[in-house]
Image: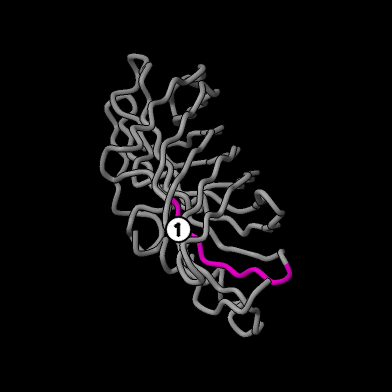
Amino acid sequence: MRIVYVLLIFLTFPFWSTGQNNWYANFSPGVDFVPPMPLIINQSGYEKISFWANYESVPLKAPVYYSYRIGFINEAKGWEAEMNHLKVYLKNKPEEIQRFSISHGYNLLFVNRVIHQKKYGSKVGFGIVLAHPENTIRNFSLDENEGILNWGYYVAGPAIQYGIFKEIALNRTFFIIIESKVSLAYANIPVKNGRAHVPVLAFHLQLGPGIYFRKKGR
């Protein structure tokens, strides 16, 4: 996961010198639901595999599901960088597929536009998929020591999301946030001697603590 944390810091770097008022950080575990989506696998020398994939995401199994966020709010509007650790495990494997998962994970890296309103807030985010695939297709296993810095990660495709949230202040420094959102992403990942096309729609529900570093009022 080291590459994920480096990229999260990189996403926030352009905002560090803005002098904005309300810098914050948040960590939110939660649960998610991934409905069936089409899966296409092309492998050299073989027929294409194409079917509707049923996934499980087991959000409470290690490595657990969560989001990290770093951002700022000024005059009720702001920006944040988010890393969402999503996982998918293929359930309905045809005989050609011995193993297919993206469990370290199907990471969604977003830059979010955030708007606070009186009772709740909303956000829209655009970003990328940073995927760590694990698969064995027709008894050919993917080498998981390739990719970025040989850590098994690949920049795999685009992602978007929309969410609504409720921030509950505990005092001027600490808060709890409840967030519900939907994300849609597409990943083009390697398999041995081929590629897999893996779109994922996910519904998320999160609850977690946060802290303000420079709160001067909105």
Q: Could you tell me residue 79's position as x and y percent? A: 65, 65
Quadrant of the image containing the C terminus: bottom right
From this view, report whether residue 36 is shown above or below residue 74: above
- The residue to which callout 1 is attached is 68
The span shown in magenta is 67-75
Can see residue 122? no
Image check: 106 left or right of 110? left
Q: Residue at (58%, 40%) from the top-left corner?
A: 181
From this view, report whether residue 213 is shown above or below residue 4: below
Q: Residue at (44%, 30%) from the top-left corner?
A: 43
Picture quadrant of residue 191: top left
Picture quadrant of residue 86: top left
Q: Could you tell me residue 114's position as x and y percent? A: 67, 58
Can see residue 45? yes
Looking at the image, which residue sits at the far front?
A: 171
User: Magenta segment: does it hold 73?
Assistant: yes
Picture quadrant of residue 184: top right
